[in-house]
Image (spheres, rainbow, N blue to C red):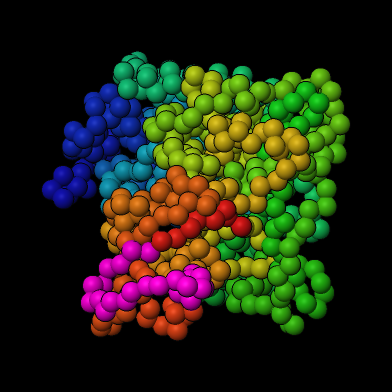
Amino acid sequence: MRSERRAARCGGAAACWLVAAACAAAEPAAPRSFADHVLMATAGISSKAADGGASFSGTGSLVSPRGHILTSTSVVPPDATAIEVMLPGFVRNQARLVAADPDLAVSLIQVDGAGLPCLPLARQVPALGELAYTAGDVDRVMLSNGRASFSRGVVSGLYEVTPQGESAYAGPAIETSAAVNPGSDGGPLVDARGRLVGVISLGVSPLRWQGVAVPTAVLLERFAALRSTDVPLSFDPPAGLGTDPATLATAARMADLTRSAAAIAPHLVAIEVTRRFPPERLPRVAWAAHRGRIGGWEGLAPAERAARFAAFANVDRAFEVNQLLRRPPGAVTGLVVSADGLVLTSLFNLAADTAFVAKATGTPRSFAADEPIQKLLADPPGGLAAQPNAVNGITVILGDGTRREAKVIARHEPLGIALLKIDATGLPAFDVAAAGTSPQLGDAVAVVGRGPGRTPPHTLNAGIVSAPSRLRGYQFQTDALFNYGNSGGPVVDAAGNFLGIATAPIEPDTVQGRLFPPPQLMRWTRAPNSGVGMVARADRIAAAFEALKGGRSFDRIPGPFLGVEPDMEQAFGEDVVIGGVAAGSPADRSGLRKGDRLLEFNGVELQTWRDLTERVAASRAGDAVTLVVQRPSRGPRLVIAGRDVDTLEDLERLKKSLTPGDTFEGTLSTDDTREIEVVLEERR
């Protein structure tokens, strides 16, 4: 707190440098210097519209020592007034608007200053897979920390975007996997040499739900204000940035992943899926357009104008969050695995989404941006009915643009994949059996998707293997970002090994026709780009490939079945307590009950539910296994022929196990532990 108060009393450029000096030495000097280079030129911005009804906030980048700051029109619109800038070190300044271009979604403002730290601009668009950095005044973090948040990722895509919400920009954009959150708009996208390569203009791309920036190469060509002699720009980054061993090693690993992605990219295809109801795009509009539809705006009092803007912002935020649950238009990814037209993809890509249809019309309801939030969240007259949005057709688009109708020949539910077939010959096929390998914890990986554009034709999201085995070894987990575009795409490592197929980016499903309030959004356990992605393992794909080619589908995990589920209140402790027993299951027939604590499995102590599931998975259907069970005691119990007889059901079970002439002995026991034999069955 002492260093913060000292910085707050300083003004001008000196305060920007004090923040760096006050940092604890938690990071090596070279990476910290890179972060300081970016953060000392990153500002928080707030502004108000000229009519006093709306307020905006976000981030900007200092691009000249005279205090020129680049930001987006979503932060400083063309009619903005009362522009306030917070420079690093808690330094507040008033700024004036120099120029704004809504078509480029960019504004240039200026604060008074001289010798201010600034970012040099890049004249070229960075390449796919290059390291990239973002900074942003996310959740007004500069008010508490004195400087912006900082994140590293890669250039994950290069393609064209269309207007969305407050951003009217249409044209080439740079997508990044570095963090972009509310408050990042207008902030910098920086390359590994410390140059500003883009201005964040869309919180997320509507195609892939990742941060997107307008390239500075485009702005230098089309934004007249940057060509003025009054704006002294720099294009030469400081020497030595990004040359520390850790950054160089990361860049080298990314170069290897980029080569691996490029090697498998020729085997990718785009897949278009049509459903009964077309994709739903919620009507996000710019405030200026919405304001123009408000009758009598000029006669409204300032308080009423502010209330109208607050209501608009509330609706826009609801649309923004709920759009994440909608499957956007556009192609997904598949991998060609035979020259005669077999294509692997994710089952998610072929799912019948849930459509909420108005009972009165039989179609999904439509939404309007000028409706109050209460009406948007309420069901329409007559109510809604949930229906599957069934798949009507599947089209595979080859690399040369040729379109072929496809059909599903097999599905594998545990792996989360499907095998498609198109009529074709001589396709560049990827040999999944020969190239597959097992994932290793911590290995660097890339999820490769068919890109929305033509150059480059693919996208690349990098991460690591965060869990090598999930779902009984059928899948593994990665923190590489999944989205609607790369679902179904291959996952490769830096050595070029094929590790698997990216599965669903969202759980439990996608929807349309209804808006969900925040409490109901909690049912989605995983949203796109959550950092938890499941991959169908290549070794399991290879093992099932011949069966899939023959048309065999798998709707369950093969193997033995016990028939119990955990008590969720104790599932993460050290007790293996049964929370439910499936009717007719081996566990049910052997007399296992809800509340039983399982102590041992064939003499092996059980401490977690994972211990139990692994022991069951290692067994075979038909195996007789002995479980040591602790059951809450209600007093002495009768044990006949080694079986507990507590209830009439236990007695009936004993009678069925005996044959005429059998003899047996009984005892009265006060021990609350017992052995129960269960014969495992094949999973039904």
Question: Residue 583 at what x, y percent from top left?
Answer: 54, 71
Q: Is residue 7 above or below residue 463?
A: below
Reply yes or no: does residue 659 show up in magenta. yes
Total residue callouts: 0
Name the foreground residue: 340 vs 203: 340
Residue, x 73% and y 63% (percent of image)?
388
Question: Residue 418 at what x, y percent from top left?
Answer: 69, 42
Residue, x 44% and y 71% (percent of image)?
662
Name the foreground residue: 230 vs 343: 343
Q: Residue furthest front?
A: 661
Residue, x 41% and y 55% (percent of image)?
625
Report which quarter residue 580 is drawn in: bottom left
Reply yes or no: does residue 638 show up in magenta. no
The answer to whether residue 273 is left or right of residue 23 is right
Q: Is residue 222 visible?
A: no
Which residues fall within the magenta stretch?
A: 654-676
The answer to whether residue 202 is left or right of residue 114 is right
Question: Residue 176 at what x, y percent from top left?
Answer: 52, 35
The answer to whether residue 402 is left or right of residue 309 is right
Q: Quadrant of the C terminus?
A: bottom right
Residue, x 45% and y 54% (percent of image)?
624
Name the foreground residue: 209 vs 634: 634
Question: Residue 79 at what x, y percent from top left?
Answer: 57, 53
